[in-house]
Image (spheres, rainbow, N blue to C red):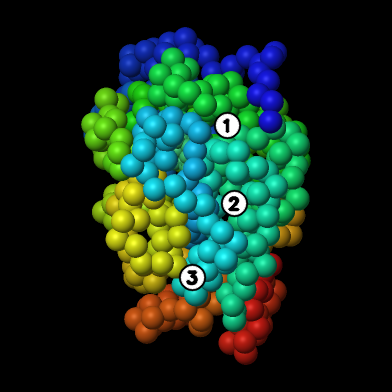
Amino acid sequence: MKIDTKGLHSFIDDDKIWLSLSSAKKCTPEKIQSVLDKASLKRGLNLDDVAILLQNEDPKLLDKMYETAKKIKEEIYGNRIVLFAPLYVGNECINDCVYCGFRISNHDCYRKTLSTDELVKETLALEKNGHKRLIMVYGEHSRYTPQFIADTVRTVYKTKIKNGEIRRVNINAAPLDAEGFKIVKEAGIGTYQIFQETYHKETYEKLHPSGPKSNYLWRLFGLERAFESGIDDIGIGALIGLFDWKFEVMALLTHSFHLEEKFGVGPHTISFPRIEPAFGSEFTLSPKHKVSDEDFKKLVAILRLAVPYTGLILTARESVEIRDEILPLGVSQIDGGSSIGIGEYSTEDKESFKKSQFILSDNRSLDEIICDLSKKGFIPSFCTACYRLGRTGEHFMELSKPGTIKSFCQPNALLTYTEYLLDYASKETKLVGSKLIEKEIESFAEGELKDKLMVKLDELKKGIRDLYF
Ligand code: SAM
Ligand code: SF4
């Protein structure tokens, strides 16, 4: 792969971001309220609006902002929450990202790449727990070619046990060249995720001192190459804690607006992982720009208001308490029952943390998470219908913006949740879940859709699987 950034110019305008953040400090409460009113219309916000919300410290207006975010999330996403699991394929890496346990200079990291047999075992272990959606994660190394990534994705799709199968594989890997993206797309991937980590170029260059990842522009334009190669389902993100978090929010949204303007469709998801301690990384123990829980909550609510239709992902890096508090503010996807040591789903290894990229905070099993979500009235969803019916990119946006996606999503969530309860749930989860489903069906508007849903639910009980709208 030849890294070529000739002719590329960053669309992140630092001066504009700082200026907007500094002017926003002088805003009156009335102006802040007017931004919240605008947000309630669910048409999103511009960067100056976002700066105003980022600088707001008034507790009453903050509470109003959280209420607005909650309302928008309920109106657009209902009580659904999509569940997935990460599958780490290999931790060999030629980059030296100071915050990552996999970086080349961490000689204490146990390097490991799953063989095909081991990958099958990992997939089976995830399927036996009830997972249907994965994100496969790779270091950056000459072994992890586009062909290798595509082959591992195909292996996962082919691996099935009883009713267990993986129906959607997303990817988190290094940016590829156009040819590479085409090869990976052919394997039938869902979203291709690349996190810019920090959008602040100077900081980026300090924290990524060597390897291909040290090239800021190659990474920044990675997802554009993906789009140009036909991948219209992409995920952006920033590693929160590397630089000023308000700058990162402004830059993430700049990136999102830029993609929407250029390709007619913005990112499918935004991720905002906070730095966690990583084995062998001093940097992660006290990052200078560490973000408090209160600011993190603010960050999530503001993203929800700014881009109401973009998926927001909150991972198990966060503690159970934080996840519980932040979930209702606009999160649409979480992982559950996650392990991030290479091979950890299928093998017992007390030293697996030495093969891990960082340390997870939420270590509950998938069933515990589903039971807990159900008790709180959330419908866990394993739905993969849109991607499998080609409702991606521009088509997805056309559907999701006017809110019609809800009429697919809610029944599909109920169908995949029912599958989980029938095939994998513990006694307690089954009990709580069945009551919740009954309640949902009662409140479902009478009509053709409800009739069709009832037929499909019946078919599931008779043993038919993988039904969707
Ligand atoms: N090697 C690929 C890359 O760098 O793009 C794949 C991604 S890496 C395995 C997945 C993501 O984990 C990174 O993009 C980074 O944002 C995040 N990450 C790395 N170290 C972390 C840490 N200490 N705490 C939390 N997240 C971390
Ligand atoms: Fe390698 Fe990715 Fe870790 Fe950087 S973040 S060291 S590129 S695995």
| Image depth: mark 1 or mark 2 in front | 2
Label 1: element kind? helix
Which numbered disc, 1 or 2, marks the residue that appears first in the sequence? 2
Q: Is residue 389 left or right of residue 89?
A: right
Q: Residues within 10 Å of mark 2 (few under 14, many from 20)?
A: many
Residue denoted by label 1: 256
Tag 3–tag 2 contact (CB < 8 Å): no
Category of crowding for the residue at label 1, using alpha-carbon neighbours closer than 10 angstroms: few (below 14), some (14–19), many (at least 20):
many
Distance in Å between CA atoms under marks 1 and 3: 35 Å
Q: As shown in the figure, which amino acid type bears the numbered disc 2?
A: Asn
Q: Give the labeled residue for mark 3.
A: 125
Q: Give the camera-side residue of 379 and 322.
A: 322
Q: Residue 48: image x %, image y %?
A: 47, 20
Other-residue count near label 3 (Cα within 10 Å), few / some / many at <14 / 14–19 / ≥20: some
* Residue occupying the point 55% across, 62% down: 119
Q: Earlier in the sequence, mark 3 or mark 2?
A: 3
Classify residue 235 by image quadrant.
top right
Mark pair 1, 2: CA separation: 19 Å
Name which residue type carries label 3. Ala
Image coords of residue 43 (percent x, y): 57, 37
Task: Please give the label number shown on residue 419.
Answer: none
Badge nearest the viewer, 1 or 3: 3
Q: Which residue is mark 2?
A: 170
Residue at the location (59% across, 51% down)? 170
The residue at 36%/38% (across/down) is 107
Q: What secondary structure is marked by label 2? A: strand
Give the alpha-carbon distance from disc 3 to disc 2, as whole Å: 18 Å
Specify the quadrant that holds the N terminus.
top right
Q: Is residue 24 visible?
A: yes
Q: Residue at x 37, y 30 (%)?
A: 98
